[in-house]
Image: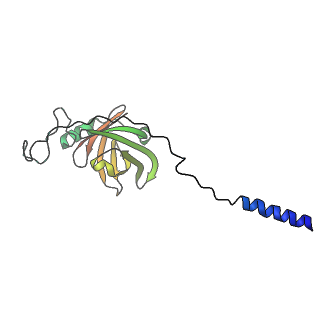
Amino acid sequence: MRFRYAVTAAAIGLSLAGCQRTAYNNDSYSAPPLQAQPVPSVQSSQLPPAGAGNGSQFPAAPAGAPNAGNPQQQQAMAASAMDVTKESMVGSWKVSNGGSSCDMFLTLTNLGSGSRGGTRGCAGELTSMGSWEVSGKQVLLKNRDGSTIGTLYKTAAARFDGSTASGQPLSLSR
């Protein structure tokens, strides 16, 4: 009988030993300091006075920039566009949109009538991109509601040009 009590007491003692509270002394533990990271340079310049220049609230397009928002330009791109397949679109793209750049990621995962897609670091309409689809020789970029926010045509082996729904020039390249 004593052996049974001794075994029971040992079992209880071992199980209670596993329930000890362990606390860290925050004064003795500290994470190593973070290393400084390089920061890209920032450019600045003065904006023209409101209403100055072209009589519009928006500045004129930079010289030499394609006017992909122009309907005639769109028709010319559509007429000379190269064939495109969904499979050739999958992956990561560098985006140039109205003078700024960002990244676009296209997958074959179904989302509504198109495939899932998204952007990183983009501005304007492209921030709401949720899907994309190929329609003939045209690539349609859509927001999360399914509305078209951009149209592109294949103009070279790894390049697509077009415009956003608001008329801003848009191009993808790898």
Instruction: State how the image is colored.
Output: rainbow
Q: Position of 35 compared to 147: left or right?
A: right
Query: Residue 51's x, y, as percent?
Result: 7, 47
Q: If the image is split into quadrants, where does the C terminus sit?
A: top left
**Closer to the camera, 44 or 26?**
26
Q: Position of 9 compared to 131: left or right?
A: right
Q: Residue at x 46, y 46 (%)?
A: 108
Determine the image quadrant of residue 155. Answer: top left
Q: Residue at x 33, y 36 (%)?
A: 39
Q: Residue at x 37, y 44 (%)?
A: 120
Query: Residue 149's x, y, as percent?
Result: 29, 50
Query: Residue 166's x, y, as percent?
Result: 22, 49
- 12 shown above or below 162: below
Seen as rendered, the residue at the extreme right is: 1
Determine the image quadrant of residue 139. Answer: top left
Q: Residue at x 18, y 41 (%)?
A: 72
Q: Position of 140 compared to 112: left or right?
A: left
**Closer to the camera, 141 or 32?**
32
Query: Residue 107's x, y, as percent?
Result: 44, 45
